[in-house]
Every structure is written in C-alpha cells, then in structure tokens.
C-alpha cells in the first residue's frame, strides 16, 4: 500500500518487508530502484517536477524518517516504522552475506567506501564488494559505468547525495538488480561520521543530534517544520 504525501507516493512497508522485497528482486533477477524518501526530498519534489517523477517511478519508496511516518498518520495511513537508508543497508547485510551477493558501493570521498567495505567485510565475509568514490569528473563517468557493468552487482548502493543519486540511478538503468540511493551511509559505515547515540534514535530526535554536531546544517533543517506544515495543509484540504 502507498500513501500520497505532498504528491510523493510512499510505501507503507516495514524494514523487514522492504528487505524481503529486495531479496525477492535479487533472486528473481528483476531490476528495481529504491528511494528512501525523507522530508527534505519530498518537500523539494513539490517544486521540482522531474524529481517527483524520478521518485514516484521508483519500485520501492520508503518512509525515511519519523517525520514521514508522522505525515502518513496525519493523512490516515499507518506506517509501522521508518526505513532510513543506513538502517536498510544494515538490515540487508545479513541477507547479502547468506546469499553471497555482489555489492557495489559508489560514492563518498576517496577512500571512504573502501573503509566502509573493510568494516562490513569483517562481519559479513560472504559478500563480494567493489567500490568507487563519488568525486569523479564527468569524463571519468564512462569508466565507472564500465567497472559496474563488469562487476555485475546484485545491489548497487549510490551515495552521491540527494537528489543527484536518485537521478543518477534513474538515468542508468540495467546496471544492477537493486539500486538504492543511500546518501551519507558510507561515511557512517566507515565510522568517519558518527550516528546519533541510541537514546537519540529511540526518541526519534536524530535530527537534533545532527543539528548540535553540525550547526551549519540548520538551514537544511528548516525544511522539516515547513514539511510538517504542508502536510497539515494537505490534510485540511482533503
Ligand atoms: N558525495 C559524493 N559526491 C559528491 C557530493 C557528495 O560522493 O559530488 C557524497 C558525500 O561524500 C557524502 C554523501 O554524498 O558521503 C552526502 O549525501 P547527503 O548529504 O545527501 O546525505 P545525508 O547526509 O543526507 O545522508
């Protein structure tokens, strides 16, 4: 089931349901594209028709953040839990390990994706990895596409920043069975950016931790109240 939030149709899947859908796509060798839709990208898509199209044409659109879960509830649909990029990636690793998937990490500053792989491979030696950093020049892109094609990943994680990664995946179909835009997940996996402590996560105030650690991001975060207001407006209108 999907819920329309400011024109973006978000799936109501839980984390385990999302992971199961991805597992099925890989085993059926059926290409799918996954967008983890946070309030920022949903808000931006209202003013960017191409972005809205790219998101809505994805096969799975997850509720990335408590703000999106809240919005769905305001609009009359229950979503059990949020499905963020980093949490989704982490819940895929045990499956990938058991199924011996091939995973390609594209994105992050030079060295970060390799560092992330080093960390993950310790716990999941069954996964076959390949990486490329995300600061390539336009003329280097064809080389990266060739590398991905030759590697034949089951899952391609693209961490080029939103919304570039969403456009990039949509513009390059046929590279993988499952393509997911994962934002700064490689930084978190590599340990160069710390996730909020568990207490912040449990209270659903990771945004507050981020604001305290990286105050220069405050401008980005002003989107959240505007998103919430727009959702209430959508509710009133309907
Ligand atoms: N990034 C990249 N290439 C670029 C710009 C950014 O690989 O040209 C990476 C950056 O290193 C970081 C991620 O994109 O790992 C940040 O994405 P975003 O800010 O969307 O992630 P969020 O912090 O919202 O998860």
Image (cartoon, rainbow, N blue to C red):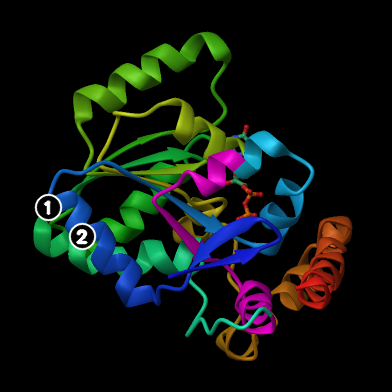
Q: Quadrant of residue 60?
A: bottom left
Q: CA distance from mark 2 to mark 1?
A: 6 Å
Which percent across, then down, holds residue 56?
Answer: 53, 48
Residue 27: image tag = 1
Tell me, yes or no, whether the highlighted magenta stretch contains residue 153. Answer: no
Residue 23: image tag = 2
Could you tell me which residue is drawn at 64 percent across and 91 percent down?
203
Horizontally, is 90 left or right of 95 in the view?
right
Q: What element does badge 2 sit on?
A: helix
Which percent across, then down, holds residue 80?
Answer: 47, 85
The residue closer to the viewer here, 179 or 101, is: 179
Magenta stretch in the rendered image: 53-74
Could you tell me which residue is drawn at 56 percent across and 81 percent down?
77
Which percent across, then down, holds residue 92?
Answer: 29, 64
Q: Residues within 10 Å of mark 1 (few under 14, many from 20)?
A: few
- Residue 146 makes an appearance in the image: yes
Q: Quadrant of the N terminus?
A: bottom left
Horizontally, is 9 left or right of 104 in the view?
right
Residue 38: image tag = none
Above or below, 153 against 206 in this view is: above
Horizontally, is 167 left or right of 21 in the view?
right
Q: Are marks 2 and 1 in contact (CB under 8 Å)?
A: yes
Could you tell me which residue is drawn at 70 percent across and 37 percent down?
49
Horizontally, is 12 left or right of 92 in the view?
right
* The furthest residue to the front: 238
- Residue 133 makes an appearance in the image: no
Could you tell me which residue is drawn at 18 percent across and 50 percent down?
26
Which percent across, then down, holds residue 76?
Answer: 62, 83
Q: What element does badge 1 sit on?
A: helix
């Amino acid at each position: 089931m999907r819920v329309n939030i400011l024109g973006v149709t978000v799936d109501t899947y839980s984390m385990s349901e999302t992971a199961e859908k991805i597992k099925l796509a890989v085993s059926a060798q059926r290409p799918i594209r996954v967008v983890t839709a946070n309030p920022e990208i949903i808000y931006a898509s209202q003013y960017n028709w191409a972005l809205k199209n790219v998101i809505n044409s994805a096969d799975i659109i997850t509720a990335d953040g408590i703000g999106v879960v809240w919005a769905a509830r305001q609009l009359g649909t229950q979503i059990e839990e949020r499905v963020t990029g980093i949490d989704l990636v982490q819940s895929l690793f045990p499956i990938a390990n058991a199924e011996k998937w091939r995973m390609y990490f594209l994105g992050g500053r030079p060295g970060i994706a390799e560092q992330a792989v080093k960390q993950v491979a310790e716990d999941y030696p069954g996964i076959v990895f390949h990486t490329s950093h995300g600061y390539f020049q336009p003329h280097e892109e064809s080389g990266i596409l060739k590398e991905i094609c030759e590697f034949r990943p089951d899952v391609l994680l693209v961490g080029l920043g939103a919304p570039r990664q969403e456009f990039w995946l949509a513009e390059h179909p046929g590279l993988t069975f499952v393509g997911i835009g994962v934002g700064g997940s490689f930084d978190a996996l590599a340990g160069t950016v710390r996730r909020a402590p568990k207490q912040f996560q449990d209270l659903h105030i990771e945004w507050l931790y981020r604001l305290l650690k990286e105050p220069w991001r405050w401008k980005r975060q002003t989107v959240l109240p505007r998103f919430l207001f727009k959702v209430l407006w959508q509710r009133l209108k309907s």
